[in-house]
Image (spheres, helix red, strand yellow):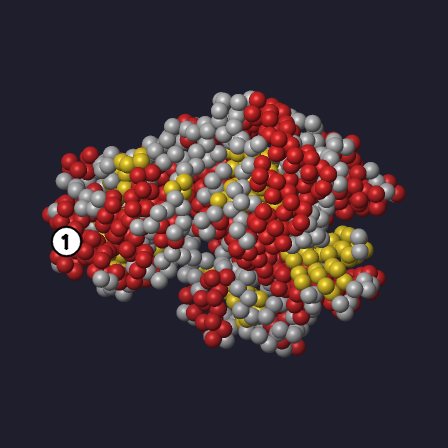
Amino acid sequence: MEKLRAAVLGSGNIGTDLAIKLRQSPLLECSALIGRSLASTGLARAQAEGIPVSAAGVEHILGNPDAFDIVFDATSAAAHEEHAPLLEAAGMLVIDLTPARRGPLCVPSVNMDAVAGNLNINMVTCGGQASSPIAHALGETHDDIDYVEVVSSIASRSAGPATRRNLDEYIHTTEAALQFFSGARRTKAILNLNPAVPCINMQTTVFAKVRDPDVSAFTRRLEAMVQEIQRYIPGYEIIVAPKLDAGRIVTMVRVIGRGDYLPAYAGNLDIINCAAVAVAENYASRRLGDANTATPRLRVVP
Amino acid sequence: MTGRRILVSDPSLRDGNHAVRHQLTPAQVAEYCHRADAAGVPLVEVGHGNGLGASSLQLGEAAASDAELLGAAREALRTSQLGIHVIPGFATIDKDLKPALELGVDVFRVAAHCTEADLTERFITFARNAGRTAYGVLMMSHMASPEVLLEEARKMEAFGAEALIIMDSAGYYLPDDVRQRIRVLVDGLNIPVGFHAHNNLGCAMANSIVAVEEGADILDGCSRGFGAGAGNAQLEVMVPVLHRLGYETGIDLYKVLDLATFAEKEIMEVVPIISSTSVVSGLSGVFSGFLKPATRIANDYGVDARDIFFELGRRGIVAGQEDLILEVAQDLAGRKAG
Amino acid sequence: MDAREAIFADCRRSVEATGIERLRPLAGSRIVVTGGTGFVGCWLLSLLAYLNDHHDFGVAATFLARRPQRLAATAPFLAGRADLTPVAGDVRQISDIPADTDWVIHLAGVPDGRHHASDPIGTASVIAEGTLRVLRTAEPVQSLRGVLHFSSGLVQAPAPGGHSRVDATSVYADAKRFSEAACAAFRTQARLPIVVTRPFTFLGPFQPLDAPWAANNFLHSALNGLPLKIMGSGDAPRAFLYGSDMAVLALCQLVGGENGAVYDLGGPEAIPVIELARAVVAHAGRPLEIRTNTASRAHPTAVLVPDVGHSVERFGFRPAFSVPEAIGRTLAWHSRRPQAGG
């Protein structure tokens, strides 16, 4: 079976987990996990799994552009701004897991096909991936949404220095996504880090102030969306069904990660990776034609 | 040590906002600040109970915007400094800190859960670069050992914090707990150390005294204890107590007593007491600010609020996770039914 | 006067004060600098460029950095020079250095206390693993005449309160201590010629103004018309050395230092921090407030003062710039830059 060749830029936890996920894909092949230092444990692990690695940074791709169809960028917003134009110019699909937002925001269960023609697709944030489908379902069932608020709680251990240094960017990007997907007039995102041991799973609560709340329509739409989401993120689950509390709609979801490389409690990181792979597989199935169109299904966790 | 100056900081208009579900008005803020300024209270903290930018469905929507509250305070405070409490993850530099700068805030008390000090780096740097004063604040400080608290505090010191405050956000501490922690912090830091008490177990004043005995230079006190849960150490009691112990505060006794009377009559709905639920929230080490939402939700679900608190405590829930109250209540109601 | 002229003028004065003959062993040699784009790296490379341009030293320098392009941002006049070859890479990963290398200066690491607090893992890893890697790489180089390892003045300083606790915020000093142990091991077992230098506090161009040290904070405040803030009472003694003097002394230690010696790298005379603040205010030419911040149970001020007696004696080291002059030169540099006051 023919596969598209993907490079993963950035050999931290996100990148390494992506590389390992790609090995299970029927449509994609990880042609390189790329970092800037062979001292990286991610590269060591990937190498041990037989995945080609490089410490040459983006040069590894730019020096050999015909060897890659897709690039997952798990570096940083600043680095993305630098190398994305070069990658796009070389005709590669760039899937951006940083907050750079050069390309349109994409949440697979919502608008994957709509953005499919772009050569740079932004995966929002982890909280954004968890909450945007909910925001979208709200937007589809309500005409007048005044305000949407998302509160995510993640295990302290799942938040590394990059997340901590970029809290503000995370918040702004998530708020922009909520606004985009729901049409709400105002949005707010809050992130809580909880150090409890055993590590808590990622949990996200969405509140909404709407005119004429229709909880049952929203619930039906949300449940349909969740079915869709669970195709590529099996650990996504509604834990508090939509209800009215003090006049606002509330619902809560939990995301348990697949545990490919990242621990299962880091559902916040897993969701953005699964979403990124879904986008890439969608692109691959279009490029490779009908022969390979199966539902781009990842291994389902029992 | 006698004759030593203690900086008494007054967060009545911030912590107290929890007690009135964040409904303080600019007019109330202005009136209070005017009197606090006259009484010589050196630092007055104003805003939503959870700080700058925290007005939200999760934490409660404020009746007035940060800009309105801070604007009212800034005008009324002539010699007293204006402070804010701010938590990265709720607020951002662009949306909240920059406007606060414009509004003339003097002191930025940047807070994080007691094990997450590294979240505060950018905010502290921002305040410092703008020429204002940044303090580091460790919340729910009972949830870490003294050694870990010191480690986190030293990170904040490295970021440029000019003082380090630990909060007994749940009102969990007994005096020896405070003695141990303040001693370790004072020994291990170069910057002044401060203590913020809550009264859930009736120890707010005693804890505050112990803190200064161990070398704390900053104490938080609220008029009539106006604050979250069972309330804070009472400002108008703290001042004469400190004076009798030989410390200086620069605060006028009669005027601070009048300030408290004013707060009681004109601003507070009730004077805080240690309710049965508050005792439990203190014992379980749960954030005092959860009292009102937990009580309401317990009522809605027909479960005992005390059970909610013990469960939240068992789960190690931190401030800001109010949404989990709903989940726990639902769970308990389910167990009750099934 | 443009940047290059200003920096070279400083280099000239520093070289003349100590005497160029001390640096003569560098002529015609190849030098590798790890971590060349920070304050120390920029001054060392500037000094080498000056020696090449004005004294025909013919030194070929290779510098390794994660992002060598940063050099162009901090010291644009050094970019693109044929005698300064950039190599991009992580110091923990270098596999070889030029076979004809005479000297190695190991600088790689971030001395910023904020970074140590927010990334102690990275801090520990770069210092410990990086030092081991550099020494291993230097081991087989037959032409090697000397290694200068940059440790830290903090290695000799006691922790506040006298505690010797190992925790997240002591990681930098502890890792630097280990790096000195690594040097001792390679020196005695692999017979590498290694000199350790412990840098203290410096003034000069190429330092970012928002970096946490007192000097930078004071300059930042002066340029922005803000109060100068001192952590503590201000009586903590500190010795300051100007950048070009620092570079001259470091090179003297490299080429003339005794094998196995540990030298301090800093100014000869300590002044209380508050005096530095006053000098900065005097230079700023406007009445700026100086604020101290003392805890009531203040610890005995940490003595972080270098002893450069050895250097004065052995190398005839003479700093060219007094502290007031150093302040003036640095303020002038920052005023000239577009981001001045930012």
| Residue type, label 1 | Ala
Residue at numbered disc 1: C27
* Residue B266 screen position, x and y as percent: 72, 41
A102 left or right of B262?
A: left
* Residue A296 screen position, x and y as percent: 66, 67
Q: What residue is rendered at 50% in x and 44% in y?
A: B134
What chain does badge 1 belong to? C
Res. C262 visible in picture: no
Residue A299 falls in image quadrant = bottom right
* Residue C188 screen position, x and y as percent: 26, 35
Tell me: residue B171, above or below residue A292. Answer: above
Q: Which sits in the foreground, A18 or A175?
A: A175
Q: What residue is rendered at 78% in x and 31% in y?
A: B276
Residue A148 falls in image quadrant = bottom right
Res. A35 visible in picture: yes
- Location of the C terminus of chain B by quadrant is top right
Q: Which sits in the foreground, B284 or A6?
A: B284
* Residue A232 screen position, x and y as percent: 68, 62
Residue A108 falls in image quadrant = bottom right
Under circle 1, the secondary element is loop
Q: What residue is rendered at 72% in x and 56% in y?
A: A206
B317 left or right of C137?
A: right
A241 left or right of B147?
A: right
Q: What residue is rendered at 67% in x and 63% in y?
A: A186
